[in-house]
Image (cartoon, grey):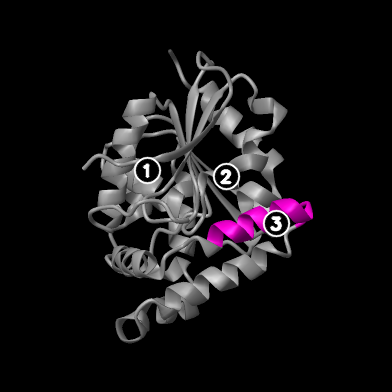
Amino acid sequence: MSMDWQLRQSGPSDGRATVLLLPGGMCSAGSYAEVMAQPGLAGLRLVAATLPGQAGAPPPDKYSVERYAELTAALATEVGADVVVGFSMGAVVALEMVISGAFTGPTVLLGVSMSRADEPAFFRALVRAGDVLGGVPAAVLAKGAAAMVGKVDLPAERRAELRADFAKNVPRHQQPALRAYLRWLHRHEQRAERLCAAGVPTWVVHAEKGDGGLTAQERRVLEACPHIRVVTIAGAVFFLPNEVPERVADLIAEAAAQVRR
């Protein structure tokens, strides 16, 4: 399947590395604007891509996490990505790309979930309610996220742009994607162990509160892995690329520094 990707690009075409940025669920490529504006990334080519079916983008042929990873790995090859960065759903897709062997370059996972215990029970229950209520849960989640982003410390016009992205989501596209994500979470495939075994330089980033988390076992495995760095952002942060773009940019720069042309 050939995807009509919605891309946002910045930086020199011959930058020292190309970084593919994958936004969270219901978010567009524009959600990385704060990160892409950081001066520390000026020498990099940055390509942000709205995931299929998110923020009004054309839907994929299948909604499984594995299919998202296949489609995105093809895009990574197409743009010549040296580094992949993902936030939330984008981080899950990037994780699947790495553990499946579809991408072997440095990877930054922002707010990634690896098992059902990493997501709150109310979220899982709301997604399951879609079996009865159709697209209603997806619409509720989009409205809730839009309300949350309205409290982020950004200029009013920027908050309006982010809220507008959430309003573009189509519930009939969101609900099957959410159900597929829930099935992926419930499979208990020891993803922390598989990520370590992949041998890929990886940064796993979470805030102390707000963007999900890791189980104690997952954290132990990741912290013991020599090529994985676990980073904890102080305080409550829900939208890492928007709320702490400087810190995210620093980590991207670290990952890009490991690229060898």
Residue 83 place in picture, x, y as percent: 45, 30
Q: Residues within 10 Å of mark 1 (few under 14, many from 20)?
A: many
Residue 138 place in picture, x, y as percent: 44, 73
Q: Can residue 107 be seen in this view?
A: no
- Give the numbered dot on residue 196: 1
Q: What element carries label 1?
A: helix
Q: In which quarter of the image is the C terminus?
A: top left
Q: Residue at x 40, y 70 (%)?
A: 171
How far apart marks 1 and 3 lie (CA) works out to: 37 Å
| Quarter holding residue 4 | top left
Q: Which amino acid does label 3 sit on?
A: Arg
Q: Residue at x 32, y 54 (%)?
A: 59
Q: How crowded is mark 3: few (under 14 residues within 10 Å), some or many (20 or more)?
A: some
**Would residue 160 be counted in the magenta stretch?**
yes
Q: Is residue 13 visible?
A: yes
Q: Nearer the viewer, residue 223 or 3?
A: 3
Q: In this view, does 16 lie to the left or right of 152?
A: left
Q: What residue type is labelled 1?
A: Cys
Q: In this view, does 210 lie to the left or right of 190?
A: right
**Would residue 237 be counted in the magenta stretch?**
no
Say whether disc 1 or disc 2 marks the residue closer to the N-terminus. 2
| Quarter holding residue 156 | bottom right
Q: Which residue is drawn at 43% across and 80% down?
A: 136
Q: Which residue is drawn at 44% across and 57% down?
A: 218
Q: What element carries label 3?
A: helix
- Give the numbered dot on residue 30: 2
- The magenta-colored residue range is 153-166
- Give the numbered dot on residue 159: 3
